[in-house]
Image: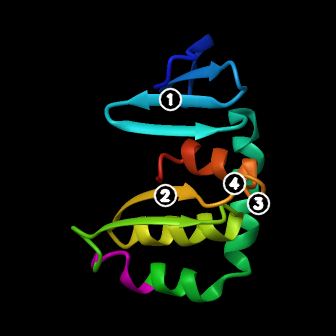
Amino acid sequence: FTSHRATRTTNTMSRQSIVTTNGLTEGLVKGEDFKVADMKLAEFGRKEYDLAEVEMPGLMACRAEFAASQPLKGARISGSLHMTIQTGVLIETLVALGAEVRWCSCNIFSTQDHAAAGIVAAKTA
């Protein structure tokens, strides 16, 4: 991490987290790192994922049909796209199909903080 280290340290979702001087929550555990605005939004984010999955039947059908066979096993996918709930459903689908996923938001102004926190809480990407 950068030299503007933590103002406090907490343990969130079994990951070591710090809140930096710029207010972002950062963490690093066993090579998994993340940067989100507020991990307290994770529960709300997970509820939003549940709602979005109902509205995204194509991705959910892919999960149902292909999750057992893991067609993306061994694939390493990285992406940079607006971090929204819908993007999170895509990320979780890729993981459910066996891919190792690494993601970053392409625009800090379009990032839905609850979506980012929900992904971190689920330990998806």
In the rendered structure, find residue 115 and report the number of the disc placed on it.
4
Q: Magenta span covers which residues?
A: 65-70
Give the amino acid type for the residue marked by disc 3 in the picture: Ser
Residue at left offset 47%, top offset 78%: 63
Crowding at dot 4, Cα within 10 Å, few <14 / some 14-19 / many 20+, comes out as: many
Q: Secondary structure at mark 4?
A: helix
In the image, is residue 1 above or below residue 63? above
Q: Closer to the camera: disc 3 or disc 1?
A: 3
User: Residue 11, position in %: x, y?
Assistant: 55, 19
Give the amino acid type for the residue marked by disc 2 in the picture: Trp
State yes or no: residue 67 in magenta. yes
In the rendered structure, find residue 110 and report the number of the disc placed on it.
3
In this figure, which residue is indicated by the disc labeled 2? 103
Q: Closer to the camera: disc 3 or disc 4?
A: 3
In the rendered structure, find residue 27 and report the number of the disc placed on it.
1
Q: Earlier in the sequence, mark 3 or mark 2?
A: 2
Crowding at dot 2, Cα within 10 Å, few <14 / some 14-19 / many 20+, comes out as: some
Residue at left offset 71%, top offset 25%: 22
Q: Earlier in the sequence, mark 3 or mark 4?
A: 3
User: Residue 3, position in %: x, y?
Assistant: 51, 17
